Amino acid sequence: MTTIELTGERDIYLTDGGLETVLVFQEDIDLPHFAACELYRSADGTDTLERYYRRHAGLARELGTGLVLDTATWRANPDWAERLGYDAAELERVNRAAVALARRIRDDFLDVPVLVDGMVGPRGDGYIAGDQQTAEEAERYHGTQIRLFAEEGVDFVSALTLSYPEEAIGIALAARDAAVPVVLSFTVETDGRLPNGSSLREAIETVDRATDSYPSFYMVNCAHPTHLPEELLSGETWTRRVGGLRSNASRMSHAELDAAEELDAGDPVDLGARYATLRKRMPWLRVLGGCCGTDIGHVREIAVATAR
């Protein structure tokens, strides 16, 4: 199996926070379709992304953690590119530019264990299951982007905000075909279940059965810690497949967040404390960061609280 090596003395690997909400609400940047990949299309936009990611690399250096350095390519797939108005050649250029930026930052932080993550997003909305692909359809659909990331030499690919198991299976199979490690991250509603109604356990076990457990590990993102299912703390074998968490700042549901006109930044100190409590129960949680509504302040609180 091709797996990610979280090596060295660094027990925690931080991610960044909620990139898109930072850009929209703090940087006052218009992001059509919540697509941060649009910024790679201009020098000014690329500079904005570089400053953002360098701040997080600096935080990892300051706190002595590792860093997962994402490409901002959650929307950089064909359906969303069509909505954004660019063709296959431009889509390829954007994905390659994203990896090049991540590599450039990594090369400037050689004292920090940095893993470059080629980020894949859902074909659909992310908040809702919507029209669901078969695993075979998802493998074909996401395969081009995943093969590009493998060619560019990313350390692994990840897929965030997945709402049903079949798309996750297809992404894992495409990653296996490209011989690149993969991390799959599901989102859950306030009841702890995926948007398609599956339990987190069902989703993970379904993907593992269909892929011979190819994913290096799983994560949960775009949900507050209070939304996580209680069974995640059971200590059962499947829970040890969950190796990371990227939570929202807000306790609001996906529907409420989608309709919100103002940012709910929640309570960073409380969020950090909740991560610390979770990690005491699940010490195998090693990739920690934020999602919607969080920024570098939230990520700092998460890192400091878990270190205690």
Image (spheres, rainbow, N blue to C red):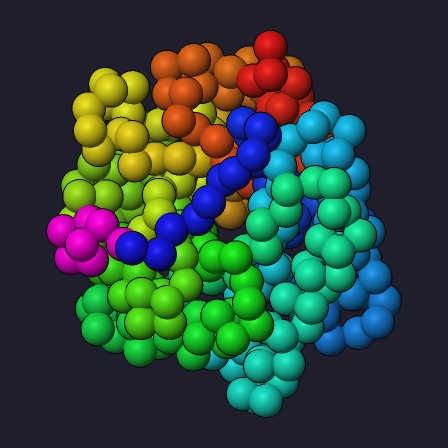
Task: Note whether residue 264 is visible.
Answer: no
Residue 86: horizontal and vertical position, in percent?
A: 60, 84
| Image position of 292 (left or right of 225) | right
Q: How many labels does the image show?
A: 0
Residue 105: horizontal and vertical position, in percent?
A: 75, 55
Considering the image in quadrants, where does the N terminus appear? bottom left
Q: Does residue 237 lie above or below 107 as drawn?
A: above
Q: Which of 121 and 97 is in front in this view?
A: 97
Picture residue at 62% right of the left edge, 37% below the top:
66
Q: To which quarter of the image does residue 17 belong? A: top right
Q: Does residue 225 lie above or below 96 as drawn?
A: above
Picture residue at 39% right of the left edge, 26% below the top:
284
| Image position of 135 (left or right of 261) | left
Q: Is residue 70 magenta?
A: no
Q: Nearer the viewer, residue 74 or 124?
A: 74
Residue 256: horizontal and vertical position, in percent?
A: 48, 39
Task: Note whether residue 50 is visible.
Answer: yes
Q: Does residue 140 lie above or below 38 as drawn?
A: below
Q: Does residue 40 lie above or below 230 as drawn?
A: below
Which segment did they paint magenta?
Answer: 208-214
| Image position of 82 (left or right of 265) | left
Picture residue at 84% right of the left edge, 71% below the top:
43
Considering the image in quadrants, where does the C terminus appear? top right
Residue 296: horizontal and vertical position, in percent?
A: 72, 34
Picture residue at 56% right of the left edge, 40% below the top:
291
In this view, the residue farthest toward the front is 8
